[in-house]
Amino acid sequence: MFDIELSNNPATALTVGTAGALTFSLQSSPLAGGQSVRSVSAVATTAPHTLKIGHSTRLVKNMRYTATKASAPDVIIDRHLIRVDKVVAAPTWGLSDPNYGITTGAQLVIEVPRLGATDTPSTQMVMDQILRVIVALNPTSNAGLLKLLNNEM
């Protein structure tokens, strides 16, 4: 499952933007508690464009039952991270960046509490939250993104 290439074409989901189709091939598998790294092979050695996916958990402690005030079990929250980074070429600066440290990137962290069969948020509820973030950035005109980048929101 991890070794399947991930094809990504934003133009199929959004009506604006200049991003075209890319295929991210597996570069490294996740270690225990780590992340997998995928890269666009055409630019892997010149201007890496990577996709990182990681999974972890966190605990919410000191919960109490409402009616009895008795201690309740810790709540486990599953965390899922997806991050895209693209190295930014700065040839006019005359900089050497052998470790590819100058990147532009975006990441999304999704947190889903394990609350049992009836109370755990559904996939649709999670997707609704992701779509709220996208709408806040206003992909039609990038107005929300510009405000965010200018510290105006």
Image (tube, rainbow, N blue to C red):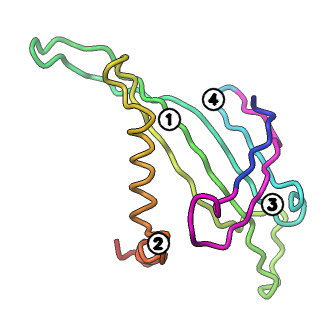
The picture places residue 36, in percent across and down from the top left corner, at 72, 38
N-term-proximal mark, 4 vs 1? 4
On residue 48, the disc is: 3
Q: Would you say 21 lies left or right of 34 here?
A: right
- State the residue at coordinates (83%, 66%): 47
Q: Residues within 10 Å of mark 4 (few under 14, many from 20)?
A: few
Q: Helix, strand or loop at disc 1?
A: strand
The residue pinned by badge 4 equals 33
Magenta stretch in the rendered image: 9-31
Q: Amino acid at mark 3?
A: Pro
The residue pinned by badge 2 equals 145
Instruction: Determine the image quadrant of residue 58.
Output: top left
130 relative to 100, above or below:
above
Q: Residues within 10 Å of mark 2 (few under 14, many from 20)?
A: some
Q: Residues within 10 Å of mark 1 (few under 14, many from 20)?
A: some
Tags 2 and 1 touching, CB below 8 Å: no
N-term-proximal mark, 2 vs 1? 1
